[in-house]
């Protein structure tokens, strides 16, 4: 292990888990920065020499996996880089879970998950380790502001988190998936069997001692966001329907409200008939047909979301398949 081989058995073994989907443009810089970080943490005696950076390749179609293999084989990095590769693109949450489980299997004491694009400030890791040493099992990286996001992303994100809160799901606002989890928290996480993974909701529900570390989130270092609008909407719908049945209840109440409205309408129609006011407009009729149709379709859609969830869960499919693994 060259100059890293300073023996220290008391320090925890850290695994930095980095999901990567088509990240060939950022990996050279990300790996350089992570290497420096890991090396300085090892030298400072804060983490053991068995600590690793585990890249979890999410079925990328570019040279991401080749790059990871090269980093793994490069003697300059003294075996710090390792990786797993999924057989197919399974999405950020699933690949992150796969990476965390691989870290757990390999005997880490503590894991830190972060994005590949260097948006998360690597130096916040020190603060996370401080909190871990003070006894926290889970440490959330919380962004101190959202300056670097587009207005659209900021607006939709805050609407999403308020909605989650209103629906009774615990999340840590302005924290994404940059967080530290120790072995106890990872073991608890490994017991969650659901196929619809929403880590930002599941992790807070694990309990344990938690802490928060604030950091400034930068711009994506290179390449474009791997989270286009379609994936963002899917993520939000999954997040809500995986944790809350409140939308179903809202549908029931809305149905009741419409029932009451229709009774009032019926009385109105009967009264108009008796006092002889001609009901002439087809406009009102047309409007109500569309309105009721729309309300019904929305309701059915919401019910359908849950039925779909049950369908997917009932198949007990594996969440991901690891195709290749580096030592
Ligand atoms: N990612 C992934 N699979 C996907 C989409 C994204 O593993 O299907 C990874 C991506 O490589 C990055 C992280 O998830 O490390 C966050 O993605 P991105 O930075 O594109 O999202 P944004 O910051 O724009 O929300
Ligand atoms: Mg990003």
Image (cartoon, rainbow, N blue to C red):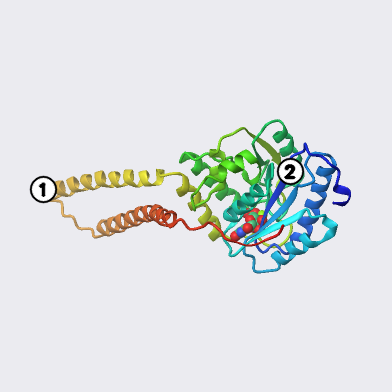
Nearer the observer, 304 or 150 = 304
Residue 3 locus on image (x, y percent): 89, 49
Please tell me which residue is depicted at 73% across the width and 60% down the height of the picture.
Answer: 222
Where is mark 2, residue-wise? 13
Q: How many numbered discs sit on the rendered protein?
A: 2
On the image, the x and y values in percent for residue 167 come to 45, 41
| Crowding near the residue tagged with mark 2, few <14, some 14–19, many ≥20 C-alpha atoms within 10 Å | some
Q: Is residue 178 above or below residue 316?
A: above
Q: Residue furthest top?
A: 134
Q: Relative to 211, does residue 192 appear above or below in the rendering?
A: below
**Nearer to me, 266 or 260:** 260
Which residue shows up at 20% across the image and 58% down it?
Answer: 280
Seen as rendered, the residue at the extreme right is 3
Q: Check mark 1 vs ligand 1: CB closer than 8 Å? yes or no.
A: no
Q: Residue at x 57, y 55 (%)?
A: 94
Q: Is mark 2 within 8 Å of ligand 1?
A: no
Number of other residues with Cα within 10 Å of mark 1, as a class: few under 14, some 14 to 19, many 20 or more: few
Residue for badge 1: 274
Q: x%, y% of residue 272?
A: 15, 49
Q: Quadrant of residue 69?
A: bottom right
Label 2 sits on a secondary structure element that is: loop
Precedes in sequence: disc 2 or disc 1: 2
Asked if disc 2 and disc 1 are in contact, CB closer than 8 Å, the reply is no
Q: Position of residue 133 (x, y in %)?
A: 72, 33
Please give left or right for residue 164 compared with residue 78 in the image: left
């Amino acid at each position: 292990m060259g100059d890293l081989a300073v023996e220290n058995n008391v320090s925890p073994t850290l695994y930095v888990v980095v999901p990567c989907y088509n990240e060939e443009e950022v990996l050279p810089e990300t790996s350089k920065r992570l290497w420096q970080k890991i090396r300085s943490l090892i030298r400072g005696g804060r983490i053991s020499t068995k600590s690793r950076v585990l890249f979890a390749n999410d079925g990328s179609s570019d040279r991401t996996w080749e790059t990871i293999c090269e980093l793994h084989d490069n003697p300059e990095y003294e075996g710090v880089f390792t990786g797993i590769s999924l057989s197919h693109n399974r999405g950020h949450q699933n690949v992150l879970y796969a990476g965390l489980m691989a870290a757990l299997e390999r005997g880490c004491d503590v894991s830190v998950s972060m994005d590949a694009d260097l948006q998360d400030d690597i130096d916040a890791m020190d603060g996370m380790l401080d909190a871990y040493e003070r006894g926290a099992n889970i440490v959330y990286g919380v962004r101190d502001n959202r300056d670097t996001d587009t207005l659209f992303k900021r607006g939709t994100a805050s609407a999403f988190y308020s909605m989650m809160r209103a629906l009774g799901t615990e999340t840590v606002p302005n924290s994404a998936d940059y967080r530290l989890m120790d072995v106890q928290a990872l073991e608890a996480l490994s017991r969650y069997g659901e196929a619809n993974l929403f880590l930002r909701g599941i992790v807070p529900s694990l309990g344990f001692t938690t802490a928060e570390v604030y950091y400034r989130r930068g711009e994506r270092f290179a390449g474009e966001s791997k989270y286009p609008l379609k994936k963002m909407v899917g993520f939000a719908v999954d997040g809500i329907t995986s944790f809350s049945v409140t939308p179903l209840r809202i549908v029931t109440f809305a149905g009741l409200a419409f029932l009451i409205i229709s009774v009032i309408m019926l009385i109105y129609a009967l009264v108009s008939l008796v006092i002889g006011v001609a009901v002439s407009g087809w406009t009102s009729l047309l409007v109500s047909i569309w309105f009721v149709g729309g309300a019904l379709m929305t309701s059915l859609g919401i019910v359908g979301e849950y039925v779909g969830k049950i369908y997917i869960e009932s198949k007990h499919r594996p969440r991901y398949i690891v195709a290749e693994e580096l030592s």
